[in-house]
C-alpha cells in the first residue's frame, strides 16, 4: 500500500477539563478526499487546528510524508504544503480582497488580482479583487478564503465547512475543483455537516464522537441515515409537519422599499415587498451577495433608512422606518444575524454576558446593574434547552465550536418569546442533529402562532421549513412562491435571474 501523506497517532488535546481530542489515529492517503464527521463539539475543529499548526497537541505524533512533523504556526504548515480554509474567517475587514491575499501569497497586486479573477471564473468563486472585505457578505468572504488557500498550491487542503454559505451551483463547481486537485496529487481533509456532500465527494471518512475516533469507513457505501446514526449515536426524528392555518395578523410588511447604500461595494435594493403573518414562515432564497446583508440590516434597524423611505417597513402594524434596533425589539422583534461572531455574540465575553446583549429586559438587570443570579440562570436554561455543548455559562463565546455558538444565539432569541423572529442562515455550520432540532423548534413556534422570516442559502432547508419562498437576485425580490407548489428548479432559475419562456426576467 502507498504510505499515507498524513498520519496521526495518539493525538490528544485538552483545554483545562475539556478533553477535545483523545488518542486520535488518522491516515490520509495521497490523492484522496477524506471526511471528518462528528457532531458540534466532537473535536473536529480542534483536530484540524493541530494539523495546521494553530494549536500544538499535548501528546501523540504527526507524520508528514513518512517523517515526524512538529508545527509551531500556520506559516510553517503552509511551507510544508498544508493549507486550510477556516469555518470562521481570518480576513482583515479594512483591507481589500487582493490585499488580504497578498499577506499570504507574494506578488504584484495586478498579477494577484488577475489570478483571483481567473480562479473565480474557473471555480464559481467570483469576487471583486478590489472590494473591501467589510463590504462583502458572509458567502463572498468564504470565497475569498477558498481562493487564498488554493493560491498557495497546497499538498494537503483542509476545508472546514467550505460549502456552508455557497449556493448549489458553486458547490458543484467546487467539487469539480477538488476532484481535479485530488487527481493532480492533492489530498483533501473535508469537514461538512451535509452528509449528501460527504457521500458525493469523499472516498474515506473518520467519525469522531466525544473527542474519540469511533469508526473509519467509505461513505459511498452508506446512506445518509446510516451516517447520521453513526455520527450522533441515535436515529434522526422525522421532520415535523406544518399545521393547516388560516391567514394570521401581519407581523412584518415591507412595501416597495428602495435603498441605495453609500458603500459602492454594497448591493442596492429595488422595489422590495414582502409580508410575514403570524403562524407563517417566509423564506428568502438567493445566492450570497445579492442584497441579503443590506436587507437584513434594514429590517433589523442596524441601517438607517433615508427619510423618504421610512414609511415602507411595518412591524406588528406599526410604522418602524424611523425606529432604531432596540425600539423594534421592544415591539416584539428578535433577530439572529448570519455573522455569529461579531454581530450575534462578542467572542471575548462569557455566555452569561452574551445572553444580556438582547435578553436584558427579562429581569436580568436590577436598578441598572446586572442581576448575576438571573443572568446566569438564563444562560444555563439556554444551554440546557438547546443542547449547547460547553463547560458552563462562564465559558467565553469564542471558545465554543461554531455550531454550539449558533445554538446558543438561536436559543437566546427564541427565549425572548418574540412575535416576529428573523433568522439569517439558521443552521450554518451546525451538525445534522442540531440542525434538525433547530428546524423542528422553528416549525413548532410557527405552529404556535409566531411569524418567522428566514434567509438561507440552503434550498433543502427552505423547502423543509417554509410556507412560501421569495428569491433575492441583484437587489430585487421575486413574487412569493407557495413552497408545496414549487420545484427547486424554479427557485434556481429565479436565483440566477433566468428568463421565463415569454422572455420576462424572473427575478
Image: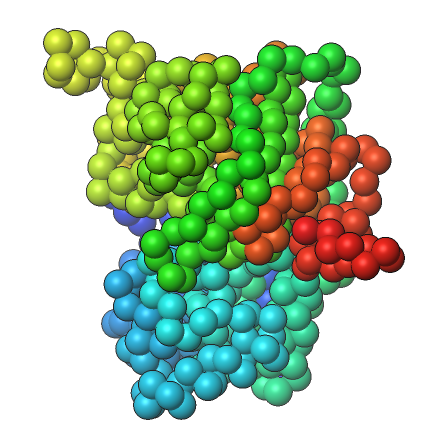
The residue shown at (59%, 86%) is 185
Residue 199 in view in this figure: no
- The residue closer to the viewer here, 34 or 195, is 195
The residue shown at (50%, 34%) is 423
When the figure is inspected, residue 193 is found, relative to residue 415, above or below; the finding is below
**Which residue is outermost to the front?**
308
Q: In which image quadrant can residue 395 be found?
A: top left
What is the image's colouring? Answer: rainbow
- The residue closer to the viewer here, 245 or 380, is 245
Q: Residue 216 at x, y = what percent?
A: 63, 58
When the figure is inspected, residue 449 is found, relative to residue 155, above or below; the finding is above
Count of labels shown? 0
Image quarter hosting the N terminus: bottom right
When the figure is inspected, residue 422 is found, relative to residue 204, above or below; the finding is above
Q: Is residue 281 left or right of residue 75?
A: right
Q: In which image quadrant can residue 100 be found?
A: bottom left
The residue shown at (40%, 40%) is 297
Q: Residue 420 at x, y = what percent?
A: 50, 21
The residue shown at (31%, 12%) is 362
- The residue closer to the viewer here, 51 or 67, is 51
Q: Residue 384 at x, y = what percent?
A: 43, 22
Residue 314 in view in this figure: yes
When the figure is inspected, residue 403 is found, relative to residue 49, above or below; the finding is above
**Which residue is outermost to the right?**
501
Amino acid at each position: 500500500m502507498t504510505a499515507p501523506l498524513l498520519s496521526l497517532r495518539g493525538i490528544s488535546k485538552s483545554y483545562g477539563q475539556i478533553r477535545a481530542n483523545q488518542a486520535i489515529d488518522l491516515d490520509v492517503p495521497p490523492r484522496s478526499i477524506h471526511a471528518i464527521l462528528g457532531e458540534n463539539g466532537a473535536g473536529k475543529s480542534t483536530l484540524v487546528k493541530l494539523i495546521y499548526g494553530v494549536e500544538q497537541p499535548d501528546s501523540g505524533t504527526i507524520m508528514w510524508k513518512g517523517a515526524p512533523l512538529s508545527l509551531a504556526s500556520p506559516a510553517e504548515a503552509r511551507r510544508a504544503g498544508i493549507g486550510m480554509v477556516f469555518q470562521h474567517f481570518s480576513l482583515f475587514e479594512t483591507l481589500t480582497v487582493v490585499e488580504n491575499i497578498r499577506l499570504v501569497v507574494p506578488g504584484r497586486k495586478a498579477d494577484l488580482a488577475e489570478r483571483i479573477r481567473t480562479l473565480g471564473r474557473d471555480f464559481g468563486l467570483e469576487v471583486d479583487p478590489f472590494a473591501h472585505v467589510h463590504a462583502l457578505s458572509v458567502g463572498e468572504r468564504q470565497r475569498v478564503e477558498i481562493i487564498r488557500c488554493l493560491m498557495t498550491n497546497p499538498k494537503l487542503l483542509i476545508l472546514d465547512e467550505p460549502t456552508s454559505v455557497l449556493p448549489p451551483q458553486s458547490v458543484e463547481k467546487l467539487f469539480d475543483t477538488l476532484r481535479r486537485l485530488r487527481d493532480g496529487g492533492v489530498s483533501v481533509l473535508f469537514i461538512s455537516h451535509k452528509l449528501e456532500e460527504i457521500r458525493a465527494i469523499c472516498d474515506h471518512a473518520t467519525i469522531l464522537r466525544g473527542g474519540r475516533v469511533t469508526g473509519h469507513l467509505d461513505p459511498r457505501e452508506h446512506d445518509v441515515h446510516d451516517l447520521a446514526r453513526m455520527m450522533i449515536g441515535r436515529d434522526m426524528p422525522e421532520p415535523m409537519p406544518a399545521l393547516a392555518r388560516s391567514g394570521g395578523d401581519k407581523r412584518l410588511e415591507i412595501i416597495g422599499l428602495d435603498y441605495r447604500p453609500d458603500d459602492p461595494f454594497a448591493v442596492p435594493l429595488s422595489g422590495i415587498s414582502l409580508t410575514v403573518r403570524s403562524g407563517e414562515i417566509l423564506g428568502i432564497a438567493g445566492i450570497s451577495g445579492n442584497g441579503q446583508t443590506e436587507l437584513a440590516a434594514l429590517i433589523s434597524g442596524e441601517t438607517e433608512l433615508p427619510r423618504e423611505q421610512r414609511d415602507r417597513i411595518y412591524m406588528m402594524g406599526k410604522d418602524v422606518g424611523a425606529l432604531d434596533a432596540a425600539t423594534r425589539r421592544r415591539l416584539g422583534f428578535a433577530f439572529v444575524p448570519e455573522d455569529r461572531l461579531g454581530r450575534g455574540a462578542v467572542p471575548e465575553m462569557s455566555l452569561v454576558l452574551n445572553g444580556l446583549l438582547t435578553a436584558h429586559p427579562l429581569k436580568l438587570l436590577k436598578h441598572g446593574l446586572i442581576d448575576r443570579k438571573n443572568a446566569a440562570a438564563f444562560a444555563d436554561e439556554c444551554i440546557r434547552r438547546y443542547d449547547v455543548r460547553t463547560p458552563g455559562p462562564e465559558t467565553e463565546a469564542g471558545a465554543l465550536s461554531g455550531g454550539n455558538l449558533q445554538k446558543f444565539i438561536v436559543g437566546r432569541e427564541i427565549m425572548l418569546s418574540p412575535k416576529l423572529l428573523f433568522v439569517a442562515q439558521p443552521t450554518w455550520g451546525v451538525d445534522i442533529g442540531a440542525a434538525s432540532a433547530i428546524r423542528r423548534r422553528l416549525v413548532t413556534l410557527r405552529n404556535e402562532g409566531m411569524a418567522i422570516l428566514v434567509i438561507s442559502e440552503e434550498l433543502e432547508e427552505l423547502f423543509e421549513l417554509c410556507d412560501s419562498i421569495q428569491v433575492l437576485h441583484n437587489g430585487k425580490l421575486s413574487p412569493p412562491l407557495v413552497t408545496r407548489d414549487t420545484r427547486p428548479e424554479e427557485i434556481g432559475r429565479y436565483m440566477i435571474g433566468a428568463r421565463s419562456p415569454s422572455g420576462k426576467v424572473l427575478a
